[in-house]
Amino acid sequence: MSRIRGVIFEILAVCFLAVNVFAQDVPPPPLPPIIEDNEEVRIDTQLVDVPISVTDKEGKPILDLKRENFAVFEDGKKQEIVNFFAADEAFEAALLLDTSGSTRAELRLIKRAAQLFIDSLREGDRVAIISFNTATAEGSVVGRSTSFPVAEVVTGLTSERSVLSAALDKVGTSNGTPYYDSLLKVAGDVFRNPASERFRGRRALVALTDGVDSTSDAGFEEASEEIAKTGIATYFVHLDTQQDFEDGLLGDCYSSTQFSKAQLRRYYNLFPKEFKIERVLDFCKLGDFERLDISKRLYSLAADQMAGMAKASGGKVFPVADLREARLAFRNVASEIGTSYSIGYYSTNTEFDGTYRKIRVEIKGLPAGSILRAREGYTAPVK
C-alpha cells in the first residue's frame, strides 16, 4: 500500500511541474488600452435622430430617396449620417385625445375619428392612447369628495388593433383640460425609454385638441421642453372650438362658461410686467368685452404653441373646423408619418454643455416646389 502511494505522489509531482512549465510558455493577456481624456468615445456621444418629411408641390410624399440624397448639418458643420430609415418603415405614435369640456359632447365622433387613425396603421406600427378623465378624491369635509381632471395613458404602445379598439371604448371625459399635463404623460410614460433600433427617428405625437389648457399643474414651457427631449415629431389635428366656447362666455356669469384661474393668470402673463393692467381673477367681475378678448388671446396663444412645436420637430398642424374633418386629417397624419424618413448622426460637438444645436437638412435631387420638414435642433445633455 505504501508503495502505491509513493507512485501516486510521483505522478502528481510530474503533472505539477508540467503545468508550471506550460504556464511560463504562455504570454500574459494584454492590458486594456489606456484612453486619454481628449479621445472621443463614441458610446458617450448622443445619437441625434432627425425625422424628415418630404412632399412635392402638390403635397404628395416623395418616396424614392436614398441615403446619398441627404446631408445634415449641426450649427453649420456637416455631420456623418450613421442611420438611415426609408419611408416605408414602421413607426410608433402617441395618440392624444382631448376629451375635455370643449369637446366631450361629441365623444362618439372623437372615438370614430381615432378609430380611423388606428385603421390606417400598417403591420408593425405601434400606438399608445392618452386621454382626459375625471378623478375623485376625498375632500376636507367628511363624506364629501371632489372631482378634478387628469390625463391618463389608456393603453401603452401596442400593434394589436383589438387592444387599441378596446382602449378607445374606455376613453372618458373630463371637467377641465389638463393638456400640458398630458404632454408630460407622453414624454414621461409613453416615450420614457429610448426607441429600439427599428423605431429610431420614427416616433410621433398625434394630438386631437384645441390646445387651450385650463387645469394643468405643468406649464407649457416645461411640457414642450420634455417633448423636445424625446426627439419625436409632433402632429396636431387642431380642432376649432373657439366659436362654441365664446358663445357660452357671455351673459350671466353663473350660467355661462367660465375661465379657470390658471387661464386668467396665463392671459395676464402675456402682458409685459411694466404694462399697467388690472388683474381680475374673479370671472363675474369681467365684462363681455374682456371675456372675449381673453378668449381670443388664449386661443391665439394655443395655436402659436402648436405651430411652434410642430415646426421645431418636423411635424405639422392640420386645422379642422369640426370632428368630421378630423377623420380625414387623422388619415392624412397616418399617411404622412408612414411615409417619412429619418436619419441619425453622432454630433462632432462632444461637449455636454446644455446648449441648443441647430440642425439643417439638405436633400439633393428634389423636384422644384418640394417641401422639406425636419427637426430643427436639440438641446445638448449636461453631464
Image (spheres, rainbow, N blue to C red):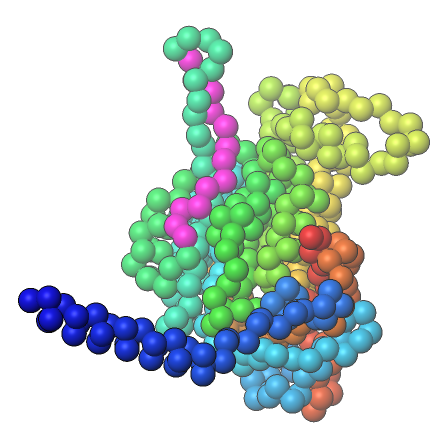
234 drawn magenta: no
Left or right of 264 in this view: 12: left
Q: Residue furthest left?
A: 1
Above or below, comparing residue 365 to residue 252 in the picture: below
Q: What type of secondary structure mainly makes up the magenta span?
A: strand
Above or below, comparing residue 105 to residue 6 in the picture: above
Left or right of 290 in this view: 213: left
**68 or 206, which is in the foreground?**
68
Quadrant that contains the N terminus: bottom left
Look at 60% across and 19% down and name the residue there.
254
Look at 71% across and 88% down and name the residue there.
364
Look at 59% across and 61% down and name the residue there.
232
Give the quarter of the image for residue 201: bottom right
Residue 191 appears in view: yes
Residue 203 x %, y %: 53, 64
Magenta span covers which residues? Answer: 144-156
Q: Residue furthest top?
A: 142
Residue 39 x %, y %: 72, 71
**286 or 136, which is in the foreground?**
136
Left or right of 272 in this view: 340: left
Residue 129 x %, y %: 44, 52
Residue 266 x %, y %: 73, 34
Above or below, comparing residue 122 to residue 249 in the picture: below
Look at 49% across and 11% down and name the residue there.
140
